[in-house]
Image: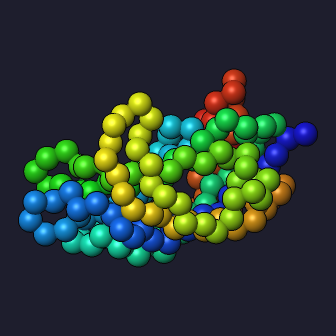
Amino acid sequence: MATNGNVKCRIVSCYGLKNADIKGLSDPYVIVSLDGKRITKTVTIDDNLSPIWNHDFMFHIRGDTFKGIEITFQVFDEDRFSKDDFLGEIRLDLQDLIDGKITNKTFVLQPRKLRPDKVQGFITVEFQPFDTNAAPTSGASQWHMQNGRMMPGS
């Protein structure tokens, strides 16, 4: 049976982030990706190791199963003159999110797969219950399953 509905999320905050700047504090932001494809980015909050975003986003999905499809939240420190520093990430299974196994939670930031990143801190993310068989909402990015991969578009 095909799943068709809206996933509503809020990136609430981080705390206890690593200071990656020599002068001042980290300037964190979050990038959210679905199956490796970027779907949203928060604003950068300057000089803050415990930023609060309350960044809401929504995406519409359509497909038969989403087991093994990851939604990734990556935290970075924005740098003006060099590559942005990785501060940590969380990876969640989209099917667990749809099934209601993940709701509002604070997660420990993790290093990237196969990288010895030194990370510290936490991220708080909220998820509203999955809206089954809902039509795409205005402003929501749309995604569908194609050959076992999430693809943008309806």
The residue under the point 42% across, 68% down is 14
The quarter of the image holding the N terminus is top right
Residue 153 in sight in this render: no
Q: Depth check: give the residue in front, 120 or 36.
A: 120
Q: Depth check: give the residue in front, 48 or 107.
A: 107
Can you give x and y, in whole percent of width and height, for residue 114 in the image?
Answer: 41, 30
Can you give x and y, in whole percent of width and height, for residue 15 in the image?
Answer: 39, 70
Residue at the top extreme, as displayed: 147
The residue under the point 73% across, 39% down is 66
The quarter of the image holding the C terminus is top right
Residue 68 in sight in this render: yes
Q: Depth check: give the residue in front, 2 or 137.
A: 2
Can you give x and y, in whole percent of width and height, for residue 87 in the image?
Answer: 33, 53
Query: Horizontally, is 63 left or right of 25 in the view?
Result: right
The residue under the point 23% across, 62% down is 19
Residue at the right extreme, as displayed: 1
Q: How many marks?
A: 0
Query: Horizontally, is 97 left or right of 15 in the view?
Result: right
Query: Horizontally, is 39 left or right of 75 in the view?
Result: right
The residue under the point 67% across, 35% down is 68
Query: Horizontally, is 127 left or right of 131 in the view?
Result: left
Can you give x and y, in whole percent of width and height, for residue 21 in the image?
Answer: 16, 59
